[in-house]
Amino acid sequence: MLMMQSRRQFLTTLSLAGAAMALPFRRAAAIEPPPETTSVRLAKIPVICFAPQYVCEALLRAEGFTDISYVDTTPLGLFKELAPGKFDFASNLSLDFITAIDGGVPITILTGVHAGCYELFAQSDIRGVADLKGKSVGMLGTTSLVATLAAYVGLNPTKDLTMVNDPAAKPFEQFVEGKLDAYLVFPPAPQELHARNVGHVILRTAVDRPWSQYFCCTLAGNREFIARYPVATKRVIRALLKAADLCASAPEQAARLIVDGGFTENYDYALQTLNENPYGSWRDYDAEDSVRFYALRLHELGMIKRDPKRILAEGTDFRFFDELKRELKA
């Protein structure tokens, strides 16, 4: 069985690599100096929407990397491990990166990954976010996105919501059992709730404005790695953006690679995620504007102390992303 999976993973990787070479990208990488290091480590979290990070191995090899590894981590442990260099790059929710930067964590946001991926489920009597006043809302990870969604429609997240994000409280199970009024989820949890016919969706960040107009998730790097290896950093970003296009143009192969690579278990859920989220639209989004938008929301809520200008100045570097937008223009 293991041999069959290894062979299938190899063939899928080969197929994606071929598809990448067929895309109408300019071959600027050939005239750049080689990467200062041939080793790169990426975070591994069982979150399907980070798909470009998980299907870019062949593209990283084409960029000159020979030692590519994925390091297991958790959403809560990511910042503690990215900053000291346990791995070099990680995708995550933009809001969480901004909060970490505000707290002095030495990481740098480099590029957007995709817009959308979160779905807000609610019990049958709730029709919109404004109806959550006085209700309980569950989530995994930080409360930043729920707070931002609530504040945008005039609610006071602290006073008007009871937020449950302690994993020990099992908020997913509580929502399924009807003990929570709403639940904010990212893949594969939305697919699980849909399959079990639990609740209904009152907001999808992939399609509902203004959230659909900004990068939901971004890629950040270890600040020391970026400073020490700028050419390698640009090549990593280029591989990731090409991988995002592949997630949009070859979702079946990408989904198979994600499953065979051990990043998630359910192929159908992975394929649904790739088909429903706008991976191929990264050229249309402004990464700096996305960080500014979310930083402003957090600053207004008092969840960060630094204003958006400081967050952008101290915690972002979009030079490579802007260059690659021009270079990879189809």
Image (cartoon, rainbow, N blue to C red):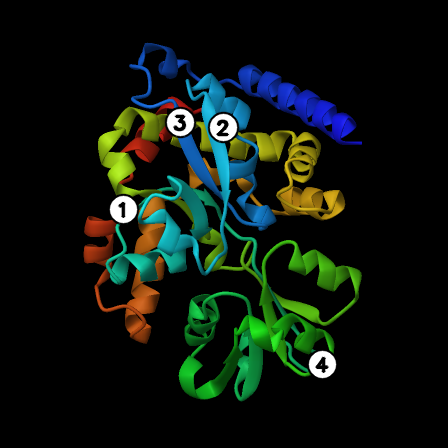
Classify the position of the N terminus by image quarter.
Answer: top right
Lateral position of residue 307 relative to residue 115, left or right: left
Mark 3 and mark 2 in contact? Answer it, CB < 8 Å: no
Q: Nearer the viewer, mark 1 or mark 3?
A: 3
Lower position in the chain sequence, tag 3 or tag 4:
3
Mark 4 or mark 2, which is nearer the start of the sequence? 4
Crowd tier of the residue under label 4, counting other residues whose Cα lies within 10 Å: few below 14, some 14–19, many 20 or above: some
- Amino acid type at circle 3 is Ser
Query: Compared to 86, does 310 lie above or below?
Result: below
Q: Secondary structure at mark 3?
A: strand
Residue type, label 4: Gly
In this figure, which residue is indicated by the disc labeled 2?
A: 242
- Nearer the observer, 129 or 90: 90
Residue at mark 1: 316
- Residue 178's tag is 4
How far separated are the C-alphas under marks 1 and 2?
Answer: 21 Å
12 on left or right of 215: right
Q: Position of residue 30 (x, y in %)?
A: 37, 11
State which tag comes first along the sequence, 1 or 3.
3
Q: Position of residue 112 (x, y in %)?
A: 41, 43
Q: Residue at x 43, y 80 (%)?
A: 157
- Assess disc 3: are there few (<14), some (14-19) or many (≥20) residues with their C-alpha within 10 Å of its C-alpha: some
Label 2, residues with CA under 10 Å away: few <14, some 14-19, many ≥20: many
Residue 219 drawn at (x, y percent): 40, 43
Residue 156 seen by the camera:
no
Which quadrant of the structure image shows residue 125?
bottom right
Q: Residue shown at 69%/35% (left/top)?
A: 260
